Amino acid sequence: MEKLLEVKDLEVSFKTYAGEIKAVRGVSFDINKGEIVAIVGESGCGKSVTAQSIMRLIPMPPGIIKKGSIIFEGRDITKLSEREMEHIRGSEMSMVFQDPMTSLNPTMKVGAQIAESLIKHQKMHSKEAWKKAIEMLKMVGIPNAEKRANQYPHEFSGGMRQRAMIAIALACNPKLLIADEPTTALDVTIQAQILDLMRDLQKKLNTAIIIITHNLGVVANLAERVLVMYAGKIIERGNLDDIFYNPRHPYTWGLLMSVPTPDLDKSKKLASIEGTPPDLFAPPVGCPFAPRCEYAMKICYEKYPEEFTVSDGHSVACWLMHPLAPKVKPPVGKGVTLS
Amino acid sequence: MARYILNRLVISLITAWVLVTIVFFLVRLLPGDPFLSEKVTPEIKQNMIKYYGFDKPLHIQYIRYISNLLKGDLGYSLRYKNRTVNEVIKQAFPYSADLGIRAVIFATIVGITLGIIAALNRNKPLDYLSMFIAIVGISVPGFVIGPLLQYIFAIKLKLLPVAQWKGFAYTIMPTFALSLGSIALIARLMRASMLDVVNQDYIKTAKSKGLSPTQIVWKHQIRNAILPVITVLGPVTATLLTGTFVIEQIFAIPGLGKFYILGIQNLDYSMVLGMTVFYGLFLIAANFIVDIIYGIIDPRIRIGGK
Ligand SMILES: Nc1ncnc2c1ncn2[C@@H]1O[C@H](COP(=O)(O)OP(=O)(O)OP(=O)(O)O)[C@@H](O)[C@H]1O
Ligand SMILES: [Mg+2]
């Protein structure tokens, strides 16, 4: 498989008056061409910052990329000029944001918002771009596309707006689509439709997708591989089955237990992980999850664990994997397995 | 859109009626007697009161006034014998309107431009300069700016004529003096609006499409930022058109201001009433037009009915 994106040891911080927020603290991962990878984790763990760093959409200042590289098709994104970035954004990689109600320009026709990037990147004339925009609307499943292209965002429902956003993002047929919680703001039934649409389009266009979510249900529906993030670090990674059927990090166990499942006994309370994530102004030297972890050992507070390989492609940063650590069993029967 | 316009129109008409009614009765509350200064016998005075219909009960006068108004007749001046209020307005208003409209256009263009420049150079010298101009503009009234301009540009530098209204050169100082406050207001509003829009999600979307900063500013930021500014153009027009009175005095412009002030001094009921009603209707119409323009620019308002 061919590598499309290689993030190496990425560190991103925000310099604020209160101090430096270390939002992303040494993250490395690869994305292959045409692959769907999910980044999951609790709110504030650095998912969006990671994604926006790849597009170089982090507001600078206050943000800075302190360390690391982001190699996209052989070029280091962190070293490109703004001008060069403009050519990549929207044409080679694009992004769908969380809130479709606010992500579209309210005073511009939806068709024009799609046509815009075609005019910019593919040097189309406005007539041609408009035609393509209508085609895109059709492709994302919007009926009456000719009429809809002439409408403004407020005339679209939430789900349709997100479809329009996807049309904008895919207009120039990018190699990478980053979807930052694309369904969080939508109704459950609409969520499923949008996920179906993304899966279909991915098959059709062979676009690689990074999908960011804190909802493991979304992951199960779509992703091939999963990166679990906590406090600015990736603490476990593996393919879908590894994460769902053989999770190794207590934090991943916690995440899995907080997924509502249809067959889950209704009388049982939905578990949530107790405690709060660490302060990112001064993250702990040891494992950031240790204070919330019921299996934490002395070393967990003192040293950040190395990544232990579980199997090919599945690795976890947890001291419990150390040969000398006590063997603990994941809490079974609490909905860890998701059908 | 048609329903939106109809809706606005009905509101405007109701406003106009309320305005006319209030002003009609308020003017009668002014202390004094319009014929007091006339050196006439009580008999003649009685005749005059009869002639103008002031002997009738107030509600009859009101009904008569309204029915005349609907025909566009504002009645005779009590002061300038044989001249109707309509004639006075017809003669003097073009000057006031000319000045007022120049000021509105000037204030809008300059205000919006200053606001944009300030926002795009946030916390840089150009921003501070624009906002300094804005604060000066808001705090210094026209009757200070007017004479100051006359002193500098007419008397000292001899670049512009001191006063009167006889050609383009004559319009420059009055227009500037009149619009300064509104320029300041619009500039501040536009700046705040630009800075608000820049943080909106759709600007991030525009950036993620690969648009350049210039394209983002022109195609996405300014149009959205102008919307809140348009809503104040109605009140700004009101301020500028009524504000002409002071500026007309300073620059000796033969507009309505003189007649209005004399009307109040002489208790010329029909003149004061007529002009107030005229101005009121004019401003209501201006607001109506602004509402329509707003509806055209902001598609979210247009939706009400197709
Ligand atoms: N512009 C910014 N200025 C300062 N701090 C920021 C900024 N953007 C993000 N952060 C901080 O970076 C950290 C990570 O934020 P991020 O948005 O990546 O979280 P997330 O994982 O996407 O969470 P969520 O699920 O809530 O979207 C947070 O602590 C946040 O406060
Ligand atoms: Mg986020």
Image: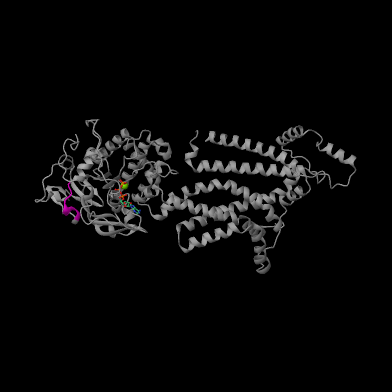
Colouring method of the image: one colour
Q: Residue furthest left?
A: A323
x then y, percent, for residue B158 = 67, 67
Name the one closer to the observer, B53 or A228: A228
Give residue A303's quadrant in the image.
bottom left
Taking depth in this image into account, of B134 and A331 the one nearest to the observer is A331
In front: A122, or A180? A180
Relative to B69, A304 lies left or right: left
Task: From the top left corner, tell me how far across and down residue B231 is, in percent.
Answer: 54, 45
- Residue A163 visible to an observer of this rendering: yes
In the picture as drawn, the residue positioned furthest to the bottom comes out as B156
Q: Position of residue A220 (x, y in %)?
A: 22, 38
Residue situated in front as seen by the camera: A312 or B73: A312
Q: Please provide percent x and percent y for residue A88.
A: 30, 53
How many numbered callouts? 0
Does the magenta-highlighted stretch encompass residue A270? Answer: no
- Res. A119 in view: no
- Quick check: A296 above or below A271? below
In the rendered structure, which segment of residues is drawn in magenta?
A295-301
Q: Is residue A143 above or below residue A173?
A: above
In the displayed structure image, the side of residue A127 where residue A23 appears, left or right = left
Instruction: Answer with left or right where residue A1 lies relative to residue A14.
Output: left
